[in-house]
Structures are given as C-alpha cells and as structure tokens.
Amino acid sequence: MAITDPIADYLTRIRNAQQARHRVVSIPNSKLKQKITEILYEQGYILKYTFDGEGKNAVINIAIKYNPETKEPVIRELGRLSRPGLRRFSSSEDLPRIINGLGVAIISTSHGLMTDKEARKQKLGGECLCYVY
C-alpha cells in the first residue's frame, strides 16, 4: 500500500515510538525525511540518527531522546501543518511562531528545508511542513 503523505507517516512513527517508550525507531528513507531528521537533531529533539541501506531498502534509524530525570520524551508535540489536501504557504513575515518561539516550525523554502527562525532571518517564505516542541 502506497503512503499518500510520507511526512505525516514519519511524524506518526516518531510519536508512536515515544508513546511505546522505544529507544530507536526505523523509518523509510527519503531526502526530505533526511533533512527533517537533521533539523530535529540540530535543534536537540533527537539523540542521534543513522541512514542505512540503499534504494528501496534505505531506512533512517532515529534514537529518541528522553529527559534523564523524568524519563519523559523531549518532544512534547509533533504535528503536521501543511498536508496534501490543504497546503499552507507563508511569507517570511507570516511564518508561524510555535509557542512564542520556544518550538520550531520546519519550512520548505526555495533554498531548501530550514527552521522558521532561519527562514525569517533570510527573509524567505515557503510551505510550512510541520512543527515540534
């Protein structure tokens, strides 16, 4: 069965793994998912990641980050903003602020994927893919 929204599937797999208290989650690989994974790592939401395999068998292994004292996942909420049935585009001035700047929105711009803060700094608008906090 073909997945119609691979980004929503990616986010759901991470949410489900956190809820089940898994340490690592494997997700089918794509360039877009690789870049989202790299942004989540740079922002400190995941512990580490690896890209394994080639072609159709390629996967992304993500080590989920938990708070050492409370054992709660670092990612409190992970959601989709734009979806195939309703695309959400924003200019650089209208980019969403997640929890007044404490969270991160991932934006697809003409210069590639980046956080909302980077897009504002570079005065770039684009499609608002997802958010995390």
Image: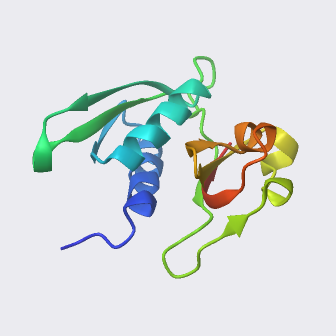
Front in this rendered view, residue 83 or 110? 110
The image shows residue 95, relative to residue 49, as above or below, that is: below
Determine the residue positioned at 37% across, 30% down: 23
Which quadrant holds the N terminus? bottom left
Task: Tell me the quarter of the picture where residue 17 sits.
Answer: top left
The image shows residue 10, relative to residue 72, as above or below, that is: below
Q: Residue furthest bottom?
A: 85
Q: Position of residue 76 (x, y in %)?
A: 64, 43
Task: Tell me the quarter of the picture where residue 125 sits.
Answer: bottom right
Horizontal side of 80 relative to 16 (left or right) equals right
Is residue 66 visible to the viewer in this orientation of the structure? no
Task: Tell me the quarter of the picture where residue 8 sits.
Answer: bottom left
Determine the residue positioned at 62% across, 18% down: 69
Front in this rendered view, residue 91 or 69? 91
Which quadrant holds the C terminus? top right
Front in this rendered view, residue 63 or 16? 63
Horizontal side of 103 relative to 130 (left or right) equals right
Horizontal side of 77 relative to 46 (left or right) equals right
Horizontal side of 93 relative to 132 (left or right) equals right
Is residue 79 visible to the viewer in this orientation of the structure? yes
Q: Position of residue 26 (x, y in %)?
A: 27, 41
Determine the residue positioned at 60% across, 52% down: 109
Q: Position of residue 14 (x, y in %)?
A: 43, 46
